[in-house]
Amino acid sequence: MTKIPKEILKNVFGFDSFKTLQGEIIDHAVAGGDALILMPTGGGKSLCYQIPALSREGVGVVVSPLIALMRDQVEALNQLGVRAEVLNSSLTPIKIREVEQKLLKGLLDLVYVSPEKLLTEGFLNQLSQCKLSLFAIDEAHCVSQWGHDFRPEYLKLSVLKNRFANIPRLALTATADGPTRKDIIERLDLKEGRLFISGFDRPNIKYTIVSKDNSKHKLLKFIEDNHVGDSGIVYCLSRARVEATSKWLMEEGFKSLHYHAGMDKTQRQTNQDKFLKEEGIIMVATIAFGMGIDKPDVRFVAHLDLPKSLESYYQETGRAGRDGLKSAAWLAYGLEDVAKISNFIESSNAQESQKRIERQKLDALLGYCETTRCRRQVLLEYFDEKLPDPCGNCDTCLEPVNCFDATVATQKALSCVYRTEERFGASYVIDVLLGNDTERITNFGHDKISTFGVGKEYSRDQWRSIFRQLVAKRLLLVDIEGHGGYRLGENCKPIFRGEETVLLREDSFSKKTGRSKDKKTKRQKTHATLNNTEDETLFQTLRAHRLELAGEQKVPPFVIFHDSTLVEMAQTRPATITEFGQLSGVGKAKLERYADSFLTVIKNYS
């Protein structure tokens, strides 16, 4: 017998109403329909399959690519009184048999499986003996070679349509541009299903991009000014930089861990568990870390190197503020990033058609980095979504960028690249423009060319900014075969002839200051979440109590309550069981389990 979704929403999950398209998606799935669902991280994707699975008869099978995601989701569901288990390579043979027996006996509401496990003939045969409510394919962009995290095993998931034709299939992702969506629909055979796009905007995230000069100093200032005591993620491109950055943050007085694919598996798992179960840790990582990290109170995501595409950037920054509270995305970007990513693209074994797509994605990312418009508008337009007015919560909105007529500067830069035979990178060409009489320049005879010393009106930092923007506009191209030298773009001829005006952003450059003193004292102060001092003190007291309970149960604190629930608790100060049950995120199971202890904390504080 079908259960009413809205009652499940309130009684199990503790919410009074659905967000955006959730209600429509859930009704469609409960009725047995297939769908591709695009919903931003933190927008409530998981409810779109969890509630239909609980509403329909049988067990819901959730395909997930990462063990960490499965474990976190199952722990959170168990806290809600939902019968959920995982099936993946992390389990012992005894535990696997135990879960499979529960599955066959109809004792589970949801089972999370890896695609490798799902696609074994033995497990598919087991599923054919079970009453199934639905299949949910999470992180569905993994099926597409145009997506940012392609997983070959996902290609075989089309078998579900053939073997379980009458079971609804829901594919879900937070990031997919037009080509990726089309690829998902074709590869998973969802042509008869519906496409739901709830919008990509994450209004609680503030977007900021800075130039890469003094990037470590800028990162330190960003954290000190905004995020002392907060959980955060810092992404770096290389393993060596990950380890060096984590060590440096610890020297600066922060709690920091590192994570990359080259580490021992046990150490990786230990660091990830600490990040999930403790508070105020900064994880420095390569992109090997993150997909499926269901930690809602990550307050910032910083990039010290450029992501490979806007999809990757959106996915990675989306790990901040999943609970809807104020969070930040911060990126340091420079010329060297463009050369590295271009090199990755050109040196890969991909077909030329795929390389062309990757180049277009890089161009879109550079355009986003160099824009003078509202960043949120540019980001959303990439995903075919319009934001009518500037957001007021990104760096270009809060500190509007000045532009200047850079036509002459551009002509000088392009001419210098041409006269140095399109062989050299930015540092060398800038030395020529500045008239630096180095031995290398003298050896090549470039102290005798007409562009030697014609650019002294700009500093080296200003010229680097100019070159970065010319690459973003494809007036200059990075010549990978020529070891990263610049060559002229096809669209530069009108610039030489003076037929087009070039407007560039006028970047400001900060001087590096000395290191902070008395770091331990400075780091002890946590930035406030709430404006009211008394509410903030109670909020921190509730967080401490939650952390204690989580330690006793050996689960991450957020599976007990999200920060957003504690914020509401601190502001409304419920005094009775009934009032506690009205809080967002408090269903029947959590009411019975936690109301008394949290009410005692509130009473003692008051």
Image (spheres, rainbow, N blue to C red):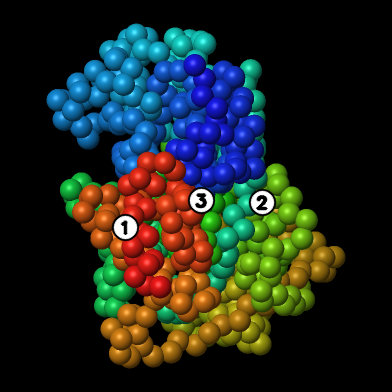
Amino acid type, residue under disc 3 in the picture: Gln
Where 38 falls versus 475 (above or below)? above
Where 18 falls versus 488 (above or below)? above
Which comes sooner in the sequence, label 3 or label 1? 3
Task: List x then y, in percent, for residue 11.
Answer: 47, 38
In front: 302, or 10? 10
Q: Could you tell me if residue 554 is visible in this image?
A: yes
Amino acid type, residue under disc 1 in the picture: Ser
Kindly indicate the quadrant of the structure image that contains residue 492: bottom right
Which comes sooner in the sequence, label 2 or label 3? 2
CB contact under 8 Å: marks 3 and 1: no
For disc 2, the neighbor class at 10 Å (few under 14, some 14 to 19, many from 20) is some
Instruction: Identify the residue under disc 2.
Output: 380
CB contact under 8 Å: marks 2 and 3: no
Task: List x then y, in percent, for residue 361.
Answer: 59, 47
Instruction: Identify the residue under disc 3.
Output: 582
From mark 1 to mark 2, how far is it between C-alphas? 43 Å
Instruction: Identify the residue under disc 1.
Output: 597
